[in-house]
Amino acid sequence: MACQAPPPEIGTHWSVRTLAAELGVSPDLVHDVLSAEDIKPHRFRYWKSSKDPEFEPKMLAIVGLYLRPPENALVLSIDEKTSIQALDRTQPLLPLKPHLIERRSFEYKRNGTTSLLAALDVHSGQVKGECIAKNNSDAFIRFLRKQLRTHSNVELHVVVDNGSSHTSKKTRAWIAKQKRLHVYYTPTHASWLNQIEIWFGILSRRIIRRGVFTSTTELIHRIITFIEQYNETAEPFEWTYSGKPLVA
């Protein structure tokens, strides 16, 4: 019953108490059974499947780069994290104490935004990044040009999503002229194939989500400092997706 939709009058999902009342048993019993079966009616997750007709060949090419990269090649996962807000709180934080979690003012002050353009070296775990004022083709091409200069003795294999700065006519025309640059576009609605997204999640959890920033200058400094410190102990992510269809 917990895995079925409740009657409309109950709500959108079962709770321990509503399920217990419906079954005529104790809430403790319901809690124990749900825990034993790892059933969590109170939780849900969004998902979206890719309808890209070329999903499989694109996916196989990218996973192939991760698992068996070409010789004398560097594999970079590149993307932008846009509109990162420099949020300040209107009152001082109340720090963590025994029996008390950290507390912060609900009200905040916006102090501007920045965007981060970053590249993950898939097989070393090292990250290079720079904050940009505008996320456009010019900024993306400039970043790629810098990677080509930095890694002048290898072939560059770059994984990107289908963002407008990556797929514009200007960007594609420039890429076509670069003999050492090979770009792989993820299937539509499959940016999870791009490993830089994993690192962006780490950045969000450790720096941005609970950060307090009095200016964009401070925000940028914290991001760049985090990248430098992260690289001191960076390791590659272990890619576990085998290419089999995701199970519903």
Image (cartoon, rainbow, N blue to C red):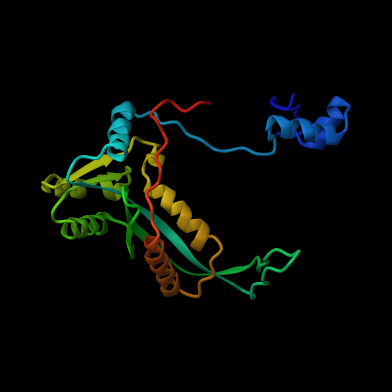
Tell me if 211 is positioned left or right of 147 in this view: right
| Image position of 207 with respect to 29: above or below | below
Q: Quadrant of the N terminus?
A: top right
- Name the one closer to the observer, 163 or 67: 67
> Count the marks: how many?
0
Tell me if 37 is positioned left or right of 146 in this view: right
- Name the one closer to the observer, 240 or 118: 240
The part of the image, by quadrant, that contains residue 64 is top left
Q: Position of residue 225 (x, y in %)?
A: 40, 69
Report the residue at 41% width, 74% height from top: 217
| Image position of 182 with respect to 215: above or below | above
Q: Position of residue 37 (x, y in %)?
A: 70, 29
| Image position of 128 with respect to 77: above or below | below
Report the residue at 68% width, 35% height from top: 40
Report the residue at 53% width, 66% height from top: 211
The part of the image, by quadrant, that contains residue 105 is bottom right
Q: Position of residue 43 (x, y in %)?
A: 65, 39
Tell me if 10 is positioned left or right of 80 in this view: right
Report the residue at 22% width, 43% height from top: 183
